[in-house]
Every structure is written in C-alpha cells, then in structure tokens.
Image (cartoon, helix red, strand yellow):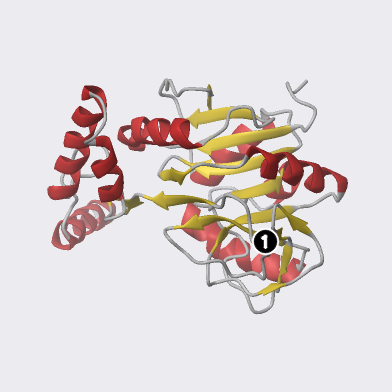
Amino acid sequence: MPKNQNNVALLVHACDRYEFLYQGFDIFFSKNWDFKIPCNCYFATEVKDATVNGFQNIKSGKGEWADRLTALLNSMEEEYVLYFQEDMWLSKPVNSAFFKQLFDFAKQNNCQQIKLHSADVYTTLETHQFIEGFNLATIDNKSSDFLMSHQVTLWKKDFLLAQLYKKEHPWRNERKGTKRLKKLNPLIHHIDYFSENGSAEINQNKKPVKRSEYFAVSFNSTLNHNALRFIDELNIGKKLEKDYADELQNHYDNVLTHDGKARPKKTDLFKQFKTWFLKRKS
C-alpha cells in the first residue's frame, strides 16, 4: 500500500539522455520543496540509476515516451499523480498547506485533472472555491489549447493512463491528446499555483499565499536562456555547485546537447535523412 493516506505520487518523468539535468533538478527541488507534503516521491529513469534527494528511483525500461510513462504508472499503487519532468527547476518555495488541501479536494471530488501552471493558452471560468487564496477555476475546453500537456499537473492516474496511446512521442501526445480531450470534454480544473517561466496569474484569485514558480531549462535537448538564472545562483554556492555551474555554462555557451554533443545543424540533419533514405532504397 502507498505510504500516505492521501494516496498521491509525485512523479518526475525523466529520460536517460537528460542525465546532465538531474543534478540541477535535485539542487533546486531540494531547496524549494517541503518533503513533509504527504506524497511519495519517484524519480523515473529508463535504465540508468539516479540518486536524487528524497526520491525513490524507479525505471520504465526503454521505449517511446507514452509507452514508458504507461509502464511507470502501471507499476505504481497511488491513485493520484503529481507530474513533473526533470527540466522543470523550482525557483520559489512551495506551501505545504496548499498541497494538503489540494490532495484532499481532488480525492473528495474525484478530480480527473488539475492543472497547476499558469499559461495564456487556457481560458478559465471562475468558481466559488479557493485553496490558500487560489481560485479553483475550471477550463473552458472549447476555447483552450493544450488540454493535454506535460507541465505540472495533478492527475487521476487512471485518467492519465487513458490519454496515453501506444508509440506516441511527447509532441504527438500533446497534439492528438488535446484533440481527444476536446471530443471527450471532461471537467478539468485549473489553479495558478506555479508561475511557469515567469507567467502571470490568469484566474480571479484572492491574495494567494506563497505562489511558487518553476522554469523549464531545456529546449530541443539543449539548455535555453532560463538556465542562466540557475547558473547565477549556483555560482554563489559551494564548490560542488560552482563546478556544476561551470558545466552548465559550457553547455549553454557551446550549444551542447544534454549528453555533451554538438547539436546537429539543419544541413547535418538533411544529410542524415538523405543517407537513411538512400540506404532504405538500396
């Protein structure tokens, strides 16, 4: 049985090629998360071992994105999943009281999906319910985009599993999953709890308490400009953090992929496709 009565798993869905980001996730999650929040923390890799403070390392095995996530969810006993990815680095502390109330609300109301990140792709409708000053809004499915997204969200596990089709890569899952959800038209909740990449609140909140924040530091397998704020913070830390900051800066300056390689130029990608195509015809 799960270790807490709220029956919630915090799942960080990572891929092995992004191992370089694990240390940064660990540092900034540890600084800003409250591990007294009643949930079980899992850091999920494919086949690599990962040591992340406060997390149990679980593994999906190799495979396409949706297939790996399906395997992970099927191995877990918890009813709800708080979904993160390894390139989402926390930059402000969280409020444990918010999450305790959130988990209770989800369970009592059989919520299927509660989006916890602010983004202007959503049109929301105000309700009379609040948690720590944050309005528990609902999504207007017809006029919103990205009903299926991989940003920080609390999911009913079985509902999330139903959105995962075999062999779907993450971009196809978001695109086609959104079309499927628009057709299904489920009740989706939204709370402005996390500012995503500096985004403003989109709901009618009432003096919300301790809004948190995260920045996605990866784009096309390389570091983006959001990484710079974290490099600055690491540079005033201990030697281990300064050393990691140097590595991050090197990756950023030289546009290296997370596995330390130069990102292929568009011409290189064309050559790779041409070579593959000619071999396929021969």
Q: How busy is the neighbourhood of tag 1: few (under 14 within 10 Å), some, or many (20 plus)?
A: many
Q: Secondary structure at mark 1?
A: strand
Q: Which residue lies under the disc numbered 1?
A: 190
The structure residue drawn at horizontal position 68% and vertical position 29%, both measured from the top left corner, is 76
Q: How many marks?
A: 1
Q: If the image is split into quadrants, where does the N terminus sit?
A: top right
**Residue reaching furthest right?**
108
In-image side of 202 versus 98 (left or right): left
The x and y percentages for residue 71 are 61, 34
In-image side of 183 versus 63 (left or right): right
Q: Is residue 182 visible?
A: yes
The x and y percentages for residue 2 are 74, 23
The x and y percentages for residue 102 are 73, 46
Closer to us: 248 or 63: 248
In-image side of 206 versus 109 (left or right): left
**From the viewer's perspective, is residue 123 above or below residue 259?**
below
Q: Is residue 62 visible?
A: no
| Three-letter residue code for mark 1 | His
**Residue reaching furthest front?**
207
The x and y percentages for residue 11 are 58, 36
**From the viewer's perspective, is residue 172 above or below residue 123?**
above
The structure residue drawn at horizontal position 26% and vertical position 30%, both measured from the top left corner, is 237
The structure residue drawn at horizontal position 57% and vertical position 66%, both measured from the top left corner, is 146
Closer to us: 260 or 214: 214
Quadrant of the rendered image containing residue 249: top left
